[in-house]
Amino acid sequence: MSSDRPTRSAVSVDTVEALVRAQMATALGGRRGMVEAGIPGILFTILWLTTKDLRTALIVSVAAAAACLVVRLVQRSTVQYVLNAFFAIGIGWVFVRIAASSGGSESDQALAFFLPGILVSLGYTVVMVLSCLAGWPFVGFMLGSVTGDPTAWHADRQVVRLCTRLTWLFLLPGAIGVLLQGPVWLLGWSDTIDVDLAVLLLGILRLGLGWPLRIGAWGAMIWLLARDATPIEDQPHHGLAAD
């Protein structure tokens, strides 16, 4: 690729899988980035479900995110993934406060905490499914955000095929979570089942099933990217550097 083409990343690779693997590691932040984005929310959920003490749950989760932020700042590395955690905690807290201001009980507030996660997962699932059906898979745009050219990857058919498969795997945990958690939340909200039971079931589904599903999906993505089976076509204009 010519030296005057702007890219944020250059990797020495021979296959499409290795190329996408290198770029996705940057886009997702690796293991550390995913842990930093997930742990504060997990702590908030566990403490809120076990103590129903909003103050304690909020302080502990924010403290965990703040500790990660301090480490990142000391190391002068990106704080993007820590800020994602702050955002998730903040949205959950807003929904809890709305429920409280409406006269909701502690159980109602706990139920409200789960709603933004369900809605976000639903939104992501719809967007990613539509992106695959339209031939512009979501994962491709993740790669484009790293390379500096959001659409150049689409010029390589092999990259598009691989990104489509990765997008289906990527959306699977969220889609299953919505299918299982959505009806439980609605049953609790409508008092069809006891609210405390709904909160308990949602907590089990989010922590007991949600993370195993994510780990399984990530494992399948890693397996797919580790095959190194597709040689890169001679298309330097695809925007994903392969020097």
Image (cartoon, rainbow, N blue to C red):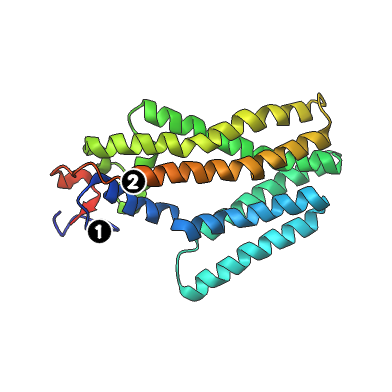
Q: Quadrant of the C terminus?
A: bottom left
Classify 171 as above or below 142.
above
Q: Residues within 10 Å of mark 2 (few under 14, many from 20)?
A: many
Q: Quadrant of the N terminus?
A: bottom left
SS of the residue at dot 1? Answer: strand
Q: Residues within 10 Å of mark 1 (few under 14, many from 20)?
A: some
Residue 227, by quadrant, is top left
Q: Residue at x 33, y 50 (%)?
A: 21
Question: Where is residue 10 shown, x and y percent of the image?
Answer: 25, 58
Question: Where is residue 201 shown, x and y percent of the image?
Answer: 73, 36
Residue where numbered disc 2 is placed: 225
Q: Residue at x 51, y 46 (%)?
A: 215
The answer to which of 105 and 184 lies nearer the viewer is 184
Is residue 180 visible in the rendered image? The answer is yes
Q: Amino acid at mark 2?
A: Leu
Q: Amino acid at mark 1?
A: Ala
Using the image, tell me which numbered label, if any, was put on residue 10: 1
